[in-house]
Amino acid sequence: MTLSPLFTRLLALVFSLCIFVADLFIPAGISVGILYLVAMLLVSGDRRAIILLAAGIASILTFMPIPIFLDEYWTKQVLLNRLITLGAIWIFGLVSIRLAKAKTRILEARNRYVKALEEMLYMTSHRVRKPLATCLGIFNLLDTTKELNQEELRKAVVYLKSSADELDDFTRELTRFMERTRVQSA
């Protein structure tokens, strides 16, 4: 089951707010801020702007309790934990963006490949069928006709040669097409 992007974004926001509220009531030595990575994970497959927005919100929520517990709460250890959390949030966000770009490139390459296959299939079905049908028709004519004079036999050979040349041209064209497709996909 795949969740809709809107639902996933709302879930990430609600989860971030729950972490923030929990952070207000949990003792200072506990680093709850790292849980913001779960919210980041929820939006990791989203657009770049959404990932950056989620990282920004998580960053703000990580340091928001400063005015509330200014003196007794913010020791060097807590501040270090918050900075590590901040680093993890942004590293995760940037990695998510790079993965999304890589996924897009892979999907685009796959789409180009599928389009090339469809084009090859079209070429094959149309360019092979005509000369093949001509050859089959001539073979059928030769098989059912009892006697052919020299002129009729010569015409049949000309048609067969023409069809064979068309097939030969097409196989060369198909080979060039496949080489171009291979080069473009590399």
Image (cartoon, rainbow, N blue to C red):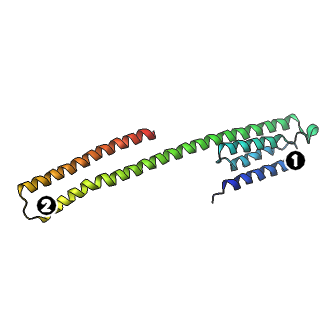
- The percent position of residue 139, horizontal first and vertical second, equals 17, 59
The numbered mark, 2 or 1, whose residue comes first in the sequence reads 1
- The percent position of residue 128, horizontal first and vertical second, equals 29, 53
Select label 2 or label 1 by which is in front: 2
Indicate the quadrant where residue 75 lies.
top right
Label 2 neighbourhood size at 10 Å, few (<14), some (14-19), many (20+)?
some
| Quadrant location, the C terminus | top left
Residue hosting label 1: 24
What residue is shown at x 25% (from left), y 46% (from top)?
A: 168
What element does badge 2 sit on? helix
Front-most of 82 and 173? 173
What residue is shown at x 77% (from left), y 40% (from top)?
A: 85
Vertical arrangement, residue 94 with respect to residue 139, above or below: above
Indicate the quadrant where residue 125 lies.
bottom left
Q: In the shown orientation, is residue 174 left or right of residue 158?
A: right
| Quadrant location, the N terminus | bottom right
Name which residue type carries label 1: Leu
What element does badge 1 sit on? helix
- The percent position of residue 122, horizontal first and vertical second, equals 37, 53
Front-most of 82 and 121? 121
Residue hosting label 2: 142
Indicate the quadrant where residue 83 lies.
top right
